Image: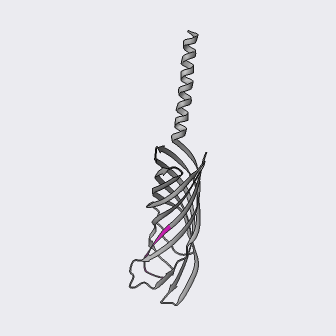
Amino acid sequence: MIRFFSGKVLIFILTFFLTQRANAQFSSFGLSVGIHISNLSIVPSAIISNPLSFYYEPQAGYHIGGYYRTSLGLVYFEPQSWITILNHSINYRDAFAGELRAGIPLNLIRLDLPFEMGIKVGPFLALYAPVFSLPLVAGSLMDIQLKKSGSWSNQFGVGLKILKFQISLRYEGPITLSEALRIGNSQDIYSAETSQIIGVVSMRF
């Protein structure tokens, strides 16, 4: 009887150990940080009557967040959660007033949820991620009405996995920040979008 129960306990311990090891091989979680080079684009609704000319300069931002990864052979799925901080500067000239305004800040904090999926061959990987973005904070010296609802965009990229680290470089398509943007004394309505190049470093716990 003792041998019988000892055998059952041994089988249970071995099964539990092997299951945990298998799960560790196919799933993981960790921390993600990244640098964003973001470009802001402002488009008037009526180009003919637009009195403002805009000048764009890429701006730097960053994110910090986490991920949970599930691997199925060559294919993996990796939902992520980022807090992204972007600092933009708006430069424009008013053709009617002859006024040039530069360096007007537009600071954005948002929650980004990339649903990353990709193919990994050896240390190399290619990825695609639809991204849902929800604005959290928006501050400016101008009268700006930003979207309060979320927006969808897409990320495409390539990466390299080294031990516990993964490095990726990705492009994120335009995200609409505002569909009803008023600038200065202009009565025209503008829309504002951002597109980004993002460098990401992830570390597995």
x and y, in percent, of residue 130 in the image: 44, 57
x and y, in percent, of residue 142 in the image: 54, 75
Vertical placement of residue 139 versus 99, above or below: above
Q: Residue at x 54, y 88 (%)?
A: 99
Viewer-closest of 67 and 3: 3
Vertical placement of residue 149 versus 165, above or below: below
Does the magenta run of residues contain 182?
A: no
Does the magenta run of residues contain 194?
A: yes
Count of residue discs: 0
Residue stretch rendered in magenta on the structure:
185-195
Viewer-closest of 88 and 79: 79
For the question of whether residue 30 can be seen, the reply is yes
Q: Residue at x 49, y 64 (%)?
A: 171
Which color scheme did the rendering employ for the protein?
one colour
x and y, in percent, of residue 80 in the image: 52, 52
For the question of whether residue 184 can be seen, the reply is no
Q: Look at the image and tell me in which quarter the N terminus lies.
A: top right
Residue farthest to the top, as pictured: 1
x and y, in percent, of residue 103 in the image: 59, 78
Q: Look at the image and tell me in which quarter the C terminus lies.
A: top right
Q: Residue at x 51, y 46 (%)?
A: 69
Residue farthest to the front, as pictured: 122
